[in-house]
Structures are given as C-alpha cells and as structure tokens.
Image: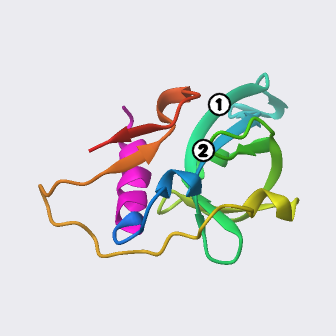
Amino acid sequence: MPKYFFRLLLLAAAATSGFGAEPERSVIQIMTFSQQPVWDAPWRFEAVRRSSGSGFVIKGRRIMTNAHVVSWAKQILVHRYQDPRPYLAHVKFIAHDCDLAILTVDNPDFFKGTVALDFGDIPEIESSVSVYGYPIGGDRLVFVH
C-alpha cells in the first residue's frame, strides 16, 4: 500500500484515540474525477480518470484527507459509512508540502450522524494502532488493528 495511505490512516488512528463507539461513522470514502495537464504540453490535458481515497470528519463540518487524493480534481464525491448516496465536496484548503487537504460538503445533511474526530497524541514508534480506511480503491471500510 502507498506510504501516503498509511500516513492518513495513522493520522486517523491518532484522531480516534479516546473516541467512543463507532469511529467508522466519521471515516469517509472519497471518489474523485481528475484530469492532469500533459507536463511537456501544458495546453493539453490527460484523459479524466477516477480514483478514490479516505478521509475523516473534523471540527467545523469539514473532512481531512491527503492532498494527492484530491489534486487536479474536477469533481469530488464523498460517501458516508453504509450510505450509498454521494455528496458533492470541494477543496477548501490544500497543502502539497505535507500532503493534506480539507474538504467542505455542500449539503449539511451529509454530517448528520457523524462526529468530528479529535486529534490525539502521535503514537510511539512501533506501538500498536487501529486504523480505518478505504484502501486502494476499495468500496468497503477496512479496519486493521
């Protein structure tokens, strides 16, 4: 699995420390449709491609994810756990230097039943952590302990 996947999942693990039951309700599946420029001919673009990633709800009705998940996105759709409805999202902030992005969702109903995850301490090296996410384009929420 890509190192960025583990980075976000470890961040989510730190965020879920001390969280009560059902942290999976705050882990979000992100689907993007993106189109990168052709770097040696920047007036042209590659074909639109579909990709996915994971994120989690944070304070202020926002979603934190990795920047590479939403880079060059033309459209971003987010899904809650066990909810088949897609919701339109937008990049509010993006920081490629630390590979993090914050998304907003147009429809306030998206956040019903979710809880913003608080950030805990960074786990000690080689300590056991529990992680949640939608790895490598999967449609199922995966829990690893």
Q: Could you say which is closer to the camera, residue 28 or residue 100?
A: 28
- Is residue 4 in view from this perspective? no
* Residue that mark 1 sits on: 51
As shown in the figure, which amino acid type bears the numbered disc 1?
Ser
Q: Secondary structure at mark 1?
A: strand
* Disc 2 packing (10 Å; few <14; some 14–19; many ≥20): many
Residue 69's tag is 2
Task: Specify whether residue 77 is painted magenta.
Answer: no
Q: Residue furthest left?
A: 126
The quarter of the picture where the N terminus appears is: top left
Q: Are marks 2 and 1 in contact (CB under 8 Å)?
A: yes
Marks 2 and 1 sit apart, C-alpha to C-alpha, by 8 Å
Task: Point out residue 123 in the picture as x, y percentages from the top left corner.
Answer: 23, 66
As shown in the figure, which amino acid type bears the numbered disc 2?
Val
**Lower position in the chain sequence, tag 2 or tag 1:** 1
Residue displayed at 43% across by 46% down: 132
Residue displayed at 17% across by 54% down: 128
Span of residues in magenta: 1-15
For the image, the number of numbered tags is: 2
Task: Point out residue 57 in the picture as x, y percentages from the top left corner.
Answer: 60, 63
Task: Specify whether 128 is left or right of 6.
Answer: left
Q: Does residue 80 sit above or below 126 in this rendering?
A: above
Q: Secondary structure at mark 2?
A: helix
Q: Could you say which is closer to the camera, residue 78 or residue 145?
A: 145
Task: Specify whether residue 8 is painted magenta.
Answer: yes
* Disc 1 packing (10 Å; few <14; some 14–19; many ≥20): some
Q: Does residue 137 sit above or below 79 in this rendering?
A: above
Task: Point out residue 51 in the picture as x, y percentages from the top left corner.
Answer: 65, 30
Q: Main secondary structure of the magenta part?
A: helix
Residue 95's tag is none
Q: Does residue 91 sit above or below 28 in this rendering?
A: below
Q: Could you say which is closer to the camera, residue 18 or residue 76?
A: 18
